[in-house]
Amino acid sequence: MRVGVLTGGGDCPGLNAVIRAIVRKGVQEYGYDFIGFRDGWRGPLEGETVPLSIPAVRGILPRGGTILGSSRTNPLTTEHGVRRIKGNLAKYEVDALVTIGGEDTLGVAATLSDEYGIPCVGVPKTIDNDLSATDYTFGFDTAVGIATEAIDRLHTTAESHMRVLVVEVMGRHAGWIALHSGLAGGANVILIPEQRFDIDQVCAWVTSRFRASYAPIVVVAEGAMPAEGKMILKDESHDSFGHVRLSGVGEWLAKEIERRTGKEARTTVLGHVQRGGTPSAFDRWLATRFGLHAIEAVRDGDCGVMVALRGTDIVRVPIADATARLKTVDPTLYAEVGVFFG
Ligand code: F6P
């Protein structure tokens, strides 16, 4: 049995831990052979491979990024994409493909499995934690830890200068990182994409915080939007690869807060710092368990499924269940943290 492995979409801490667990268990317990595909779906599309064996995965557990590389290539929108993938899987004699990815990568895996009979097993990853059908994705805990540490540090400099500090975190469609790090870091305002914000209300919270002689910290997810009025973003277009870029809400907020309250404001955009570096212990644990269960699913011939965390159990769900809709922050949960605003 030969198993292919790929990592697609934005990278996140814990990818290497999954790869290591898949290979270790697959070789040691089942005697399988492995082949890595480079840069997500680009690998099977173009037939670009990476050797994958026990020596190749030695020492990678704590390493961020992915030894296989990643990309957002989508074979379903590439000419003869499915045919080329089938051809390369046959060429390399691959019997099953473990696809580690987020919404887009797994969406492709679901289609290839369900409609074209290509045997895929999915492993969910994203720092955004916005995949349905799993309680958590690995990468999220690490990103929240990094954002929380940044907020802790920004508190002291905000207090020294009595300034507003706006922290922009990742999350285009879901505010999980903003919500968790904002709550853990004692932010005074948390803004998420799921709920449009009222800039007057934000300024009122900022002012009330100053009145209590504290400097406010505003945590904003990159996809958060004001309720009304045009938000002129620095760059709301597409980059040269055609990806949507949303950076700018943090800077916009700082300028508006300064203009409306007369208080000095600064912005910190955490960006890809949230995705880099070594995974937290929780993410190593979750990624490893996902890897062990994914290779079991391969052994069982259970294709078109994704491993998922339910409570403390790892279960299998149809990949399509995870990609059908995004898991966003529930309004009740958001309302719960509102008691700390202002
Ligand atoms: O999906 C993960 C994510 O980190 C998002 O939070 C963020 O908006 C996006 O990827 C950034 O993508 P890129 O690295 O392609 O700029």
Image (cartoon, helix red, strand yellow):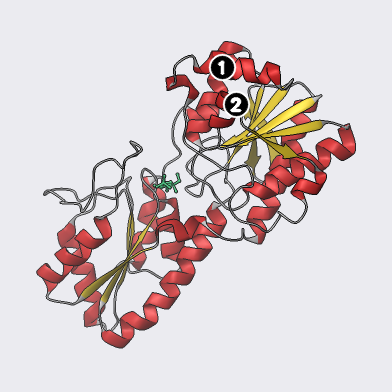
Question: In the rendered view of the protein, which quadrant contains the N terminus?
Answer: top right
- In the rendering, at what x and y percent does residue 87 appear? 62, 15
User: From where the camera sits, is residue 322 visible?
Assistant: no
Q: How many marks?
A: 2
* Disc 1 target residue: 84
Amino acid carrying mark 1 in the image? Arg
Say whether residue 322 is left or right of residue 24.
left
Question: Residue 136's spot in the image, x, y percent?
Answer: 57, 46
Tell me: residue 236, above or below residue 255.
above
Q: Between residue 107 and residue 212, name the one nearer to us.
A: 107
Quarter holding the C terminus is: bottom left
Whether tag 1 and tag 2 are in contact, CB under 8 A, the answer is yes
Q: Residue at x 51, y 58 (%)?
A: 143
Q: Residue furthest bottom?
A: 160
Closer to us: 129 or 20 = 20
**Does residue 320 appear left or right of residue 262 in this picture?**
right
Q: Position of residue 274 (x, y in %)?
A: 48, 58
Task: Answer whether residue 78 is visible to the viewer in this image.
Answer: yes
Residue at image x 29%, y 50%?
Answer: 224
Which image quadrant is residue 44 in? Answer: top right
Crowding at mark 2 (Cα within 10 Å: few <14, some 14-19, many 20+): many
Q: Please give left or right for residue 171 compared with residue 7 in the image.
A: left
Q: Which element is circle 2 on?
A: helix
Residue 52 rendering spot, x and y as whole percentages: 74, 39
Of the numbered discs 1 and 2, the one sitting upstream in the chain is: 2
Label 1 CB sits under 8 Å from any ligand 1 atom = no
Q: Nearer the viewer, residue 313 or 178?
A: 178
Q: Amino acid at mark 2?
A: Pro
Residue under circle 2?
44
Which residue is rendered at x = 81% and y = 48% of the image?
Answer: 55
Helix or strand or loop: what does disc 1 sit on?
helix
